[in-house]
Structures are given as structure tokens and as C-alpha cells.
Image (spheres, grey):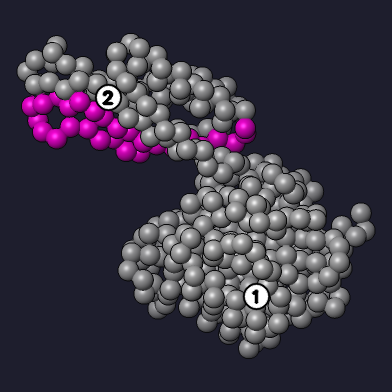
Amino acid sequence: MTNLNMPEMLKTQLTDFFYELHRTPELSNQEFHTTQKIKDVLTQYDIRILDLPIKTGLVAEIGHGEPTIVLRSDIDALPITEQADVAYVSEHQGVMHACGHDFHATAVLGTAILLKQQESTLQGKVRILFQAAEEVGTGAAELVQAGVLEQAQAVFGIHNDPTLEVGVVGCKAGALTAGVDRFAIHIQAKGTHAARPQDGNDPLLILANIINIFQTIVSRRLSSDENAVLSITQVHSGSTWNIIPDTAFLEGTVRSFDAETRQRIEQQIRQILEGLATTFNAKIDLDWQPGPPSVMNDEKWAQFALDTAQKSGFEPRVVKASPIGEDFSYYQEQVNGAFMMIGSGGPFPLHHPKFKVDERILIPTSLYLATLVQDALIEIQDS
């Protein structure tokens, strides 16, 4: 392992860059200025940028030959109005880095610069992803399609975690995040005057049955060792107090941790809706929108990431799986690797208008990731 350190000038540059990204957030697939800012810094340090057919985001490469390791960050923001108590508050009304992708991008940018300074001693090649559109779950799949995993032997990524204290790196083998599915249900029945319900077909009664029966899927149809969450998050119907409406709508999400459970829940939802449509003589349409699968960490690389965290001055911690979604999983469907959680200190959760990353973790994270990929290249060479 190369002993790495970071010059004060670079620390200042990275901190200022983090502030700049936070002040100028951009939504998924609109990260044009963010992409250009990252490109400008990479060009300043003579880091080569790959020419890929992608609209936003970019991919850099450092080193030569084989093996190849991929390191991923994400760059998009959320449609949230910021309320965080920071001097570098968002200047884009209604848009905010409420998930810390500004931190991820800056930390990995710092890693790229550190690796460039060590390029002559690298035991292979590091491909660095500044991925767009993580929040809408499409960015990783786009980069996989563009060929960023070609000849890769391992893939790593990070996410900040405000539930972990500053100085902690969390990881675990197996499922770390959940597979994410979204559903929308449209009910078409028959409206009537509320005083004569027998003349219509009440969609609200059907909606109420859907809500009640759906809650039995996890509690009564899965075994106690299968983890899943089903949440209904939107319900809409009607327009006044004395009319039974024609239609009703509900929407929600399913989170699960293995592919078989995920498939079974979808099948059960479809069966329930088909049965209710027959029972109530109504039309019920399901719009099922599958999102990213679970992040599944390779056992070897998860332990390697924790061991390197300890060598880099962090507290390594085996964490529990989280029901959040993360499209890093698309990379792991092709290449083994590990996704690590970097403690960012809270107190507000991800996607909260008062969320902020404790900036003390920025420089240590860059150093940790640089050590991780250097050591991983050596590990692959020696294995």
C-alpha cells in the first residue's frame, strides 16, 4: 500500500469545489454544468476522459494495462427546496443536493487526482465514473450499456449515511440495499349520488379493500425470514361530499432484498387485483415500474473494503441492510465489488430539506478510496 497524503492546496481546491457543486445543483439528466465543472478539473490535472455516447456525466481513466477497477460516484440532485443551515446554500430554487451526491462526486474527484499523482506506480487501470441520473434509477444502466465495465475485475462505490457517525465506514456482504419497485393502480367503477349507492359501483370500497389486503402480503404471505416493505403513499378519489366518484387511484412502493421475494410480491399483487376486479365487477389497471435490484456486495470485496477502512483511519462497521434503493446494483450484476456507506453525521436523513454532509469527511474519504483501489489492484495481481 502506498502511503498517501494530500497537499493543503488540493484540500482547499476540493473543499471549494464541494461548495460550488452544492450551490449549483442540477436534476437527473440535466447535469450539464456539473459535468463541465468536473471535466474542467480533470483536464487541469491531465486526466484522460473517455469519449462515450452519454448526455451528462462522464468517465475518466487513470493508469494502463490490466487489471481494471471501476470506481463510481453520482452527480445529480433532487427537486427539494433547501433549508439546511450552510453558508453555501443552493442557489437553484427548488433544487438541492439532499442526498450528498455533491460530496460523492467531490470525494471521488479527489481520489482521481491522487491516483493521477501515483499513476506511474499503479498496478493496472482505474476507471472513474461520474454518473448522472441515480435518483431516477437510469444512470447506471446507461453507463453499463456504454461499456464502462469492459474488462473490469471489480467495482466500488460509496454513499454517505447520516445514520452513521463521522469516522465510520459501513459495509456488509450480501444485500446492502433493497430492490425498489413502484406501483400505480387505477380503478374504474361507476359513480352515483351518495344517497343511492345501489345505483353505482363504489371505487372507494374497492380501494379500501386493496389497501387492507395488500397489508397481508408481507405479514401473512411471506415467511418470517423474508424481509420486505410495502407502503401505499398516495390515494386520490372524488371531488365533493355527496357524489360517489367513478374512479380512484393509489400509488406506492415495494422494497425487498432478494429476487425471488421480489418476483413473488409482484405476482401476489397482480392476483389480488385480478380477484378484486372480478369480485367488484370493476376495471383495475396496474402500472408496475421495476427499479434497481438490491446492491449485493461480494463477500471478499466487502471485507477488503472494511479492512482498508481500518488501515485508512476509519472505524469499520458491519451494518444492516437498508430499504433504500441504489442503482449501483446494475454494475454488480456484471462485476463483483462492494458498496460502502460513509458516516456523514446527521442529524437529518437523506432527502430531507435540512440534510447536510459533515464536510470533515471529504478529504479522508478521497484518501480512503485512493488506498482502496490501489490495494485492490495489487490484490487482483497477486491472486
Main secondary structure found in the magenta portion: strand
Amino acid at dot 2 = Gln
What range of the chain is rendered magenta?
233-259
Q: Quadrant of residue 107?
A: bottom right
x 69%, y 44%: residue: 333
Residue 249 magenta-highlighted? yes
Q: Secondary structure at mark 1?
A: helix
Label 1 to label 2: alpha-carbon separation: 54 Å
Q: Secondary structure at mark 2?
A: strand
x 43%, y 56%: residue: 351
Classed neighbour count for the residue bearing mark 2: other residues with Cα under 10 Å, few (<14), some (14–19), many (≥20): many
x 62%, y 34%: residue: 258
Q: Position of residue 273 (x, y in %)?
A: 40, 20
Q: State whether residue 121 is above or below residue 376.
A: below
Left or right: 326 in relation to 81: right
Tell me if I can see residue 98 in this picture.
Answer: no
The residue beneath circle 2 is 188
Q: Nearer the viewer, residue 142 or 341?
A: 142
Q: Position of residue 171 (x, y in %)?
A: 67, 51
